[in-house]
Image (spheres, rainbow, N blue to C red):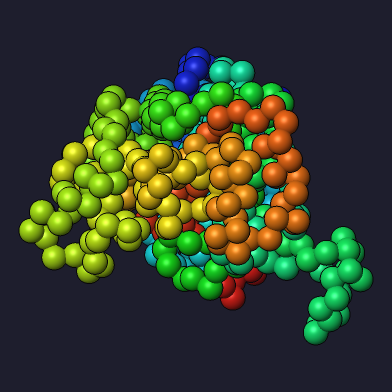
């Protein structure tokens, strides 16, 4: 039974017989000894394999290439090198998969842009090994967070006939030939696409199970090539019945702090790597968020603070306009110096489903802003009053018939309820310091890029 390198380094027993399998990160040849650094993906650090000339096939092993896959058995011994406590004195080595000099990861450092072009191999690099171990731990932490609070996990549809955000930026799902527009002849008998959000369906389940969450892929057919946008990404979307905007922001704060702790406590080695190689000061920044009290600020106050700042922004600051990233970062970094909820936005810049406040101008919406990024979570209390919801849909020209089921949820046993959405990749970017969304998702889908 082979041992993962991470386990081996955590529980070192000198003299123990071990069996390992992994890929060659580096090979150093001397006259009598080979030094092979082997990594199996379980940890940032590899382990050194020492091969003495007396081992059979020594000459052939001296010619194995970086990237080759090996199985190794040997004894765990103390290492004389200062950077590692133990190494493996090899007794047998089997070359499972050879690699020649054309293997693309021969150098120690490559640009992220180059590594995106070989997304099938980049997980073997240090940076992307760290990114995807962090991603895995965070995903496990998300499920654990909601399980500990008795939230029901629901799989909302990937194929849907409803556009939750109303932006019309959905990928079409169809069996019709190009140019055909009679969707009654299509596979589902109506116009369908890939979901942009599981929220509307999540609301239905919240009206039966009280607390639910979705965590799955979402899609946006937005022709955008920025470092923050992808065509396929993952969203975490909890919904709570018998809850208002205050409950929503409280859950969001607890959630973000929890995931900061997961990163710091369960991914220590990888987070230290990010701090050293990607963003100096990252550990301190994440620790501050994990311990912070998140500030609440009314949208009205935020506009006043921005207008009185004396700063010349690229985008205008006026009541009724949405906040841009430069505004959000100024508020969180300069005004508050930490995480910040902006609440009660103007009704006309928010979605139809958000609960209208008594002032007739704003809705019970909130965005969580964090230093270095800006918005990381968006949420709201949902409009539970049928008459107000129908009135808002009429004002916006949203047809009621396709959303008859959504309106039905307000007819019988409707409750005040609230929820939010957190883009998983945006979270990973924030916690790792990685600056491009393409570098925190295994196989990024962006306009004109879908190779793998």
- In the rendered image of this protein, does residue 402 appear above or below residue 298? below
The part of the image, by quadrant, that contains residue 194 is bottom right
Q: Residue at 49% across / 71% down in the picture?
A: 224
Residue 288 in the figure: left or right of residue 344: left
The part of the image, by quadrant, that contains residue 198 is top right
Residue 341 in the figure: left or right of residue 308: right
Q: Residue at 53% across / 34% down in the picture?
A: 418
- Residue 376 placed where, x, y %? 40, 45
Observer able to see residue 106: no
- Residue 148 placed where, x, y %? 57, 17
Q: Residue at 56% across / 24% down in the picture?
A: 242
The part of the image, by quadrant, that contains residue 368 is top left
Image quadrant in which the N terminus is located? top right
Observer able to see residue 411: yes
Residue 118 in the figure: left or right of residue 347: right
Q: Residue furthest left?
A: 310
- Residue 12 placed where, x, y %? 48, 18
- Residue 296 placed where, x, y %? 29, 34
- Relative to the observer, which residue lies in front, 244 or 287? 244
Residue 347 in the figure: left or right of residue 67: left
Image quadrant in which the C terminus is located? bottom right
- In the rendered image of this protein, does residue 238 appear above or below residue 23? above
Q: Residue at 55% across / 61% down in the picture?
A: 396
- Relative to the observer, which residue lies in front, 92 or 357? 357
- In the rendered image of this protein, does residue 313 appear above or below residue 257? below
């Amino acid at each position: 039974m082979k041992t993962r390198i991470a386990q081996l380094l955590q529980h070192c027993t000198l003299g123990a017989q071990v069996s390992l399998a992994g890929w060659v990160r580096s090979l150093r040849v001397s006259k009598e000894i080979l030094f092979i650094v082997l990594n199996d993906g379980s940890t940032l650090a590899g382990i050194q394999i020492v091969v003495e000339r007396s081992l059979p096939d020594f000459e052939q092993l001296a010619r194995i290439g970086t990237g080759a896959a090996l199985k190794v058995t040997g004894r765990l011994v103390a290492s004389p090198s200062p950077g590692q406590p133990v190494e493996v004195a090899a007794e047998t080595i089997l070359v499972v998969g050879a690699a020649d000099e054309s293997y693309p990861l021969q150098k120690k450092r490559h640009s992220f842009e180059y590594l995106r072009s070989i997304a099938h191999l980049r997980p073997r690099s240090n940076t992307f090994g760290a990114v995807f171990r962090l991603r895995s731990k965070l995903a496990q932490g998300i499920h654990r967070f909601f399980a500990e609070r008795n939230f029901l996990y629901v799989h909302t549809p990937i194929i849907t006939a409803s556009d939750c955000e109303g932006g019309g930026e959905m990928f079409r799902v169809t069996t019709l030939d190009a140019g055909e527009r009679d969707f009654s002849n299509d596979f589902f008998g109506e116009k369908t696409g890939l979901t942009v959000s599981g929220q509307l369906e999540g609301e239905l389940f919240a009206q039966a199970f009280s607390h639910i969450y979705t965590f799955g892929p979402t899609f946006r057919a937005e022709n955008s090539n920025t470092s923050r946008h992808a065509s396929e990404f993952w969203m975490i979307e909890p919904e709570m019945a018998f809850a208002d905007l205050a409950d929503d922001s409280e859950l969001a704060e607890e959630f973000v702090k929890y995931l900061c702790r997961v990163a710091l406590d369960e991914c220590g080695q990888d987070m230290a790597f990010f701090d050293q190689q990607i963003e100096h000061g990252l550990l301190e920044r994440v620790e501050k968020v994990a311990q912070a009290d998140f500030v609440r600020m009314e949208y009205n106050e935020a506009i006043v603070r921005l207008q009185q700042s004396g700063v010349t922004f690229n985008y205008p600051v006026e009541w009724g306009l949405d906040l841009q990233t430069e505004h959000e970062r100024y508020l969180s970094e300069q005004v508050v110096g930490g995480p910040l909820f902006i609440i009660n936005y103007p009704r006309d810049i928010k979605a139809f489903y958000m609960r209208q406040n008594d002032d007739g101008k704003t809705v019970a919406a909130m965005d969580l802003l964090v230093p270095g990024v800006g918005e990381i979570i968006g949420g709201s209390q949902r409009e539970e009053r049928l008459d107000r919801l129908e009135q808002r849909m009429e004002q916006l020209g949203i047809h009621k018939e396709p959303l008859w089921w959504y309106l039905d949820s307000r007819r019988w046993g409707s409750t005040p309820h609230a929820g939010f959405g957190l883009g998983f990749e945006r979270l990973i970017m924030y916690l790792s310091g990685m600056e491009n969304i393409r570098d925190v998702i295994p196989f990024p889908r962006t306009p004109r890029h879908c190779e793998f």
